[in-house]
Image: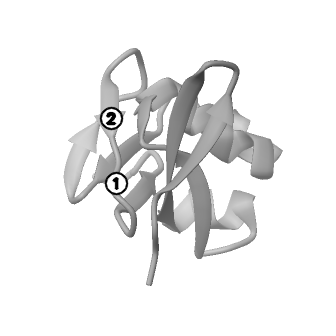
Amino acid sequence: MLWATKKRVGLFAHNSALVVVLYFAKSAELAGVRTETISVPQQITSLQLWEEIVKRHSRLAAIQDQVVFAVRQEYVLLGDQLVVLNPGDEVAVIPPISGG
């Protein structure tokens, strides 16, 4: 079972959640994994979430300008958009898709 945890940072409580990150196509190739579980703050901007992922897999930085997330199967663009994550949520890293 996955649980949210509280960490004390200064005077503030900081909630975190274990989420499942799914990598597809080029993002899986660059990350070297198809799935992993990571701990991140429950309230985080989509850009901060991306930065947490890139800390683990620096090669993903190459696709930052084209990548999009899906959180609970809803698209989220990288930026200041606040994402509220629950323990066990799935975050899909969707790279640029080419085709005709």
Image-based side of 39 in relation to 20, left or right? right
Residue at 39% x, 51% y: name it.
97
Q: Label 1 to label 2, Cα distance in Å? A: 30 Å
Dividing the picture into quarters, in which one does residue 35 lie? bottom right
Dividing the picture into quarters, in which one does residue 8 lie? top right
Dividing the picture into quarters, in which one does residue 34 lie? bottom right
Amino acid type at mark 2 = Val
- List x then y, in percent, for residue 37: 58, 69
Disc on the earlier residue, 1 or 2? 2
Image-based side of 69 in relation to 17, left or right? left
**In the rendered image of this protein, does residue 40 appear above or below residue 11?**
below
Amino acid type at mark 1 = Gly
Q: Secondary structure at mark 1?
A: loop
Badge 1: residue crowd in 10 Å (few <14, some 14–19, many ≥20)? few
Image-based side of 37 in relation to 92, left or right? right
Residue at 42% x, 43% y: name it.
42
Label 1 sits on residue:
99
Residue at 70% x, 20% y: name it.
10
Dots 1 and 2: beta carbons under 8 Å? no
- List x then y, in percent, for residue 21: 51, 63
Q: Nearer the viewer, residue 3 or 36?
A: 3
Badge 2: residue crowd in 10 Å (few <14, some 14–19, many ≥20)? some
> Residue at the top extreme?
80
Image-based side of 28 in relation to 46, left or right? right
> Residue at the bottom extreme?
1
Label 2 sits on residue:
83
- List x then y, in percent, for residue 68: 39, 40
Q: Secondary structure at mark 2?
A: strand
